[in-house]
Amino acid sequence: MLCKVIFCIVLQQCLYQGAFGATVPKLPSYFKICHQSDANLAKCIKKSVEELRPLLVKGIPDLDIPSVEPLIIPEVIIDQGSGPVSLRSVYKDIKVYGPSKFTIKDIKVDLEKDKMRIKLWIPSLKVSCKYSIDGKILMMPIAGSGLSTANYSNIEATVILRAEQIKKGDNIYYNVKDFYVNFDIGDAKIHLDDLFNGDKDLGEAMNLFLNDNWRQIANEIKPVLEDNIAMIFKKFANKIFHKYPKNILIPK
Ligand SMILES: *[C@@H]1O[C@H](CO)[C@@H](O)[C@H](O)[C@H]1NC(C)=O
């Protein structure tokens, strides 16, 4: 046990040494600086995030952050043996169009606890991917593989970031420890091509069934999607936080 703890500490140290810059680079002008003393700190951070929007569309090569239009999720595997949705399904080359069209509804910042909560609204997301699926949805057998497309609209998302502060040399850096994403979808239209080896009648019937029951199905698979999206944005956030120390991003 003790060995494991020591190993972790050593390993973390190594990771941080690799991740944090030895010299502090100049903050690019596309980052809007907010001061800790700002009476309207949340408002300032809201603006700062909104001003990153065109960069999120283009990607930020300096920070090794790719474009989010589309947001690419290489693979999601949903493998659950029991419950209303019991199936093994693999989704590859997932392309999500629309995430940059977010509106920030609310931001709460707690500097003492290194915590931030953002509520977002996204009008619509268009998703395409390659799928393969085998199992049962609400008692109905389903099987197939091919292309899948979906349109989601009226999406409300809550994002919660919890960070810790890491001292490195003379500087203190944020490290996002927990990144939590939860979303609620207003409406969904999904289509799976080539279900049941391309059997048209069965495939159409199943697509109707999926669309009639999308909300219950979405609730079953949502946690996996939320975790995957959270992982991607946690990485993006840490690319910024590990490069620029706290006193540059959010000076006193
Ligand atoms: C999604 O919307 C587009 C139009 O923007 C439409 O062509 C497409 O058929 C829709 N997909 C689904 C699965 O409803």
Image (spheres, rainbow, N blue to C red):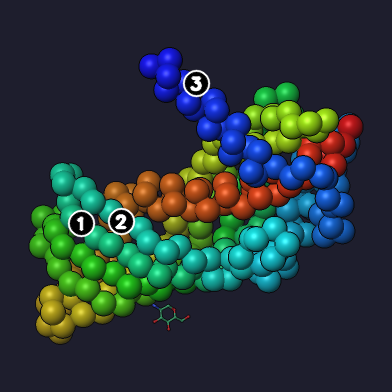
Q: Is the residue at mark 2 in contact range of ligand 1, meaning its CB lies under 8 Å from it?
A: no
Residue 62 visible in this rendered orientation of the protein: yes
Q: Residue at x 65, y 29 (%)?
A: 164
First in sequence: mark 3 or mark 1? 3
- Name the spot of residue 184 as percent of width and height, x first: 46, 51
Mark pair 1, 2: CA separation = 7 Å
Q: Identify the amino acid type marked 2.
A: Ile
Q: Identify the amino acid type marked 1.
A: Arg
Do the residues bearing badges 3 and 2 touch, measured as CB atoms within 8 Å? Answer: no
Q: Is the residue at mark 1 in contact range of ligand 1, meaning its CB lies under 8 Å from it?
A: no
Residue 179 position (above or below residue 92): above
Q: Is the residue at mark 3 in contact range of ligand 1, meaning its CB lies under 8 Å from it?
A: no
Do the residues bearing badges 1 and 2 touch, measured as CB atoms within 8 Å? Answer: yes
Do the residues bearing badges 3 and 1 touch, measured as CB atoms within 8 Å? Answer: no
Residue 97 position (above or below residue 29): below
Q: Is residue 20 left or right of residue 160?
A: right
- Name the spot of residue 2 as percent of width and height, x first: 43, 15
Mark pair 3, 2: CA separation = 33 Å
- What residue is pinned by disc 2? 77
- What residue is pinned by disc 1? 88
- Name the front one of labels 3 and 2: 3
Mark pair 3, 1: CA separation = 38 Å
Residue 191 position (above or below residue 14): below
Q: Residue at x 74, y 32 (%)?
A: 168
Return the mark for residue 6. Answer: 3
Return the mark for residue 51. Answer: none
Residue 125 visible in this rendered orientation of the protein: no
In what element is the residue under mark 1? strand
Where the N terminus falls, by quadrant? top left
First in sequence: mark 3 or mark 2? 3
Q: Quadrant of ligand 1?
A: bottom left
Q: Is residue 79 left or right of residue 106?
A: left
